[in-house]
Image: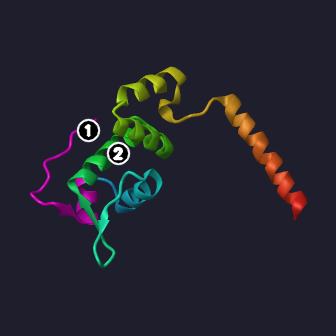
Amino acid sequence: MESIPALPEKDFFSMGEASRIAQVPPYTLRYWEARIGYLRPSRRSSGHRRFSRADLETIFLVKDLIQRRKLTAAGARRALIEHRKGKPAAVARQAAADGSATGAMPVSALKLLREVRKEIQSLMHELK
């Protein structure tokens, strides 16, 4: 995992400060907040986000999972769940064993999903 840089002596950080420290754009932090779920900054009465030190640690963990390990947002969420349970090694072993470290699905599963989607679309068309 990427090391966390020295943080200023503050308890909370604004969106701009958090994005500068993590070196990611603010829209990326908002996306991770919406998609991954473990990133939950508190809000001021004005609605502005306030990131704690724990939030910044989570940001760096998510950044590592997505950018360095090349996981998808869903894969990063699963890895965070396992990490919170204390089983990060099990996730890495499983990802290496089934080839899902990149978040990719097997070709047969993709074909099945495409067929199911076509079937659902045709049923929806018939019901209109």
Q: Which residue is painted at 32% across and 42% down in the image?
A: 61
User: As drawn, which residue projects farthest toward the left?
Assistant: 9
Tell me if residue 27 comes above or below residue 68 in the rendering.
below
Mark 2: few/some/many CA within 10 Å (<14, 14-19, 20+): many
Q: Position of residue 54 (x, y in %)?
A: 24, 51
User: As drawn, which residue projects farthest toward the right?
Assistant: 126
Q: Position of residue 32 (x, y in %)?
A: 41, 54
Residue 113 in which image quadrant = top right
Q: Bounds of the magenta span?
A: 1-21
Amino acid type for the residue under numbered disc 2: Lys
The quadrant of the picture occupied by the N terminus is top left
Q: Position of residue 123 (x, y in %)?
A: 86, 53
Q: Position of residue 107 (x, y in %)?
A: 67, 30
Q: Dots 2 and 1: beta carbons under 8 Å?
A: yes
User: As drawn, which residue projects farthest toward the top?
Assistant: 97
> What residue is pinned by disc 2?
63
Q: Is residue 98 left or right of residue 90?
A: right
Image disc number at residue 50: none
Amino acid type for the residue under numbered disc 1: Glu
Tell me if residue 127 comes above or below residue 72 in the rendering.
below
> What residue is pinned by disc 1?
2
Q: Which residue is painted at 21% across and 63% down in the image?
A: 13
In primary-sequence order, the first of circles 2 and 1 is: 1
Tell me if residue 14 comes above or below residue 8 in the rendering.
below
Residue 50 in which image quadrant = bottom left
Cα separation, mark 2 vs mark 1, equals 8 Å
The quadrant of the picture occupied by the C terminus is bottom right
Q: Which residue is painted at 21% across and 39% down in the image?
A: 3
Asked which secondary structure carries label 2, the reply is helix
Q: Which residue is painted at 25% across and 59% down in the image?
A: 18
User: As drawn, which residue projects farthest toward the front?
Assistant: 85
Residue 11 in which image quadrant = bottom left
